[in-house]
Amino acid sequence: MLNSFTKNIIDFFKLLHIVTNNSFSNNPSLFFTVRRISNKTKSQNPQSFTVSYLRTKLGFPPESALRISKYVHFKTPEKPDSVIAFLEQHGFSDTQIRQIILTRPALLCSDVEKTFLPKFQFFQSKGVTGPEISKLLVYNPRILSRSLEKRIIPCFNQLSKLLQSDSKAITALRRNPYLMEIVKDVKEMGFNPLLVKFLHAVILFRKVSKPAMESKFDVYKKWGWSDDEIWEAFRRYPGVLEASKEKITAIMDFLVNEMGFQSLILANHPSVISRSLEKRIVPRALFARELLSKGLIKDLKFSVVFGTSEKVFVQRFVNQYKDKAPELLKLYEEKLKFAVRGKYKSN
């Protein structure tokens, strides 16, 4: 297929042939032919006007203007002028306006009265100041293209309910402008907005990049987890995707290869991933194994061994058997020292 530039060149030569080889006076219909071709040529190249506007009005360099023009076209300056004027009136700097357009070019064709104004009024009603709105939208200009009723208000209300006040929700948005999109995505994953883990998941999605998250998925998959099992573990305890790859590997290696647990047991008890390998997991596991060898316990209950507080663990596994084995407290203290100074380390 011919591109628009090639078509314009062909039309130009058609026009040149008509003008140089015919007379308007002898053939009046040629006037309308010339006009039709001329208009067609203009209408086929709105990109040139867009590029020119982006360069002269917004100061984009030629390369950036051409790249942006691939995502937005306009033949007249009315709408983009109104968008720029609106943002300027609300305190946006030239740099901030360019950043918004660079991120979301289609916003230049927005109806500011219908699309922008209601959202500004909503945030202002919640106590968000002009400079704060500017920061919020520069970091996340997609908000301007989202539905106020279906997306923005429900997301803000969820955040406000979770943090128990509008003012705290505003503070959270000041620190993390991306929370307004993320909140809905996390809710759709099945998290209860009334639970603390909902906020944990929201913050995690903001903090961990997509490539980093994918690399952690790869680590779990090497230990036999499926995508569904990883996401289920994440819903139970978001911290499974917060731990470093090195820590995940170290914990898996010890519990699976040293202690003989099945790797998927961690998918059912994902909070263990957040525990310290050297201060909790290793000493408790080695100590519990000693209890098994002495016949003092019948099995290792994963959640009890690794999920209880230090006080509860000592009472349940050390003090409970001190009459039968007085050396247990000393043995546990030795396991703690061994783990800390030994080979078991994690980030």
Image (cartoon, helix red, strand yellow):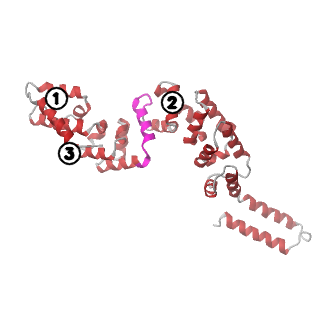
Residue ID for mark 1? 317
Q: Tell whether label 1 touches label 3 (CB within 8 Å).
A: no
Amino acid type shown at disc 2: Thr
Q: Earlier in the sequence, mark 2 or mark 1?
A: 2
Residue ID for mark 2? 171
- The answer to whether one can see residue 27 in this image is yes
Left of 288 or right of it: where is 77? right
Residue ID for mark 3? 343
Q: Residue at x 68, y 65 (%)?
A: 5
Residue density around tag 3, few if under 14, some if 14–19, many if 20 or more, within 10 Å: few
Q: Tell whether label 3 touches label 2 (CB within 8 Å).
A: no
Residue density around tag 2, few if under 14, some if 14–19, many if 20 or more, within 10 Å: few
Region in magenta: 192-211
Q: CA distance from mark 2 to mark 3?
A: 43 Å
Amino acid type shown at disc 1: Phe
Task: Return the residue found at the far right.
Answer: 25
Q: Main secondary structure of the magenta part?
A: helix
Q: Residue at x 70, y 49 (%)?
A: 57
Q: Residue at x 61, y 33 (%)?
A: 130
Percent x, y of residue 299? 16, 35
Percent x, y of residue 42? 75, 59
Amino acid type shown at disc 3: Lys
> Which quadrant is the N terminus positioned in?
bottom right
Whether residue 207 is in magenta: the answer is yes
